[in-house]
Amino acid sequence: MRKRTITTSVFALFLLSGTVGTQKYVSSQITSRVEREMPKASGVRASIPLADLPSNITSDAIKAVIVDINSYFLKENNTNVSLKITAKNISKSKPTLVGSLEVIATIPESTIVESAEFNDARIVGNTLQVSVGPGGAGTAILNPRYSNSQLYFEIQSVLFMGREIPASSLPSDLQSQIKSRSQRSLAPPKGLEVQSVSLSSKGLSLQMLGNNVKLSNLGSAL
């Protein structure tokens, strides 16, 4: 009985080792494919969920792939971003066509702060805060927005002498000034739509979603 238990354990360990090896091989092949389609990417790491491996091997499609890219140069506005790509339902016969694609592009905090045309810009929580008024006595709290391929900030409120003044109580042209000073063009790749934009300690992130997207669209548009 003990011999049988040991034999079973060894077999299970061998099977697991083979599965992990297969996962690493498939992941490396996907990484190479991404690097060919997106030659400007650096620090590419692709992975597939271990639980999906059996079905990925036997079916005509790969259920899900997660790709992390440390740095990618946006030619549109000369900015380096990090990318997290989640691709689902990838046909093996057409591996560059992704059934469902989510891309999260994050502009580093340092880039946001350096490029902002405001005084003492800094990310606090999920807002951008900048000094305003004589001697920087006030603090404007800004939120990121995205519309019509334009990324910009708008005022949420202004803190002055311990009092919070909502945007609705500020001069009407101030919102337009903030938008014009912060506005940047950023068009998503073909087949993707921007769903949300947010700030965090990592920087400014745009979430983009799309269906039946060609992987080459990312390389040519981003």
Image: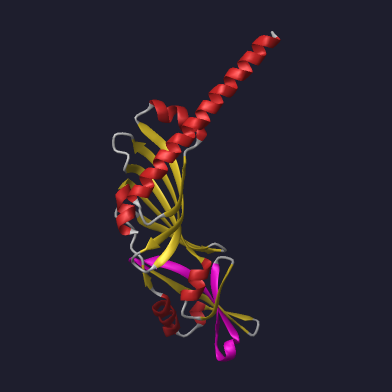
Residue 19: image location, x then y, percent: 51, 28
Q: In this rendering, does residue 181 appear at all?
A: yes
Residue furthest out toward the bottom: 134
Residue 78: image location, x then y, percent: 38, 68
Left or right: 187, with 18 as reference point: left
In the rendered view, tell whether residue 168 sits above or below residue 62. Answer: below
For residue 5: magenta? no
Give the magenta part as a residue range: 127-150
In this orientation, which residue lies closer to the viewer: 100 or 156?
Answer: 100
Residue 126: image location, x then y, percent: 55, 65
Split into 4 quadrants, where in the image is the N terminus? top right
Q: Main secondary structure of the magenta part?
A: strand
Q: Residue at x 55, y 27 (%)?
A: 17
Split into 4 quadrants, where in the image is the C terminus? bottom left
For residue 138: magenta? yes
Q: In this rendering, does residue 206 appear at all?
A: no
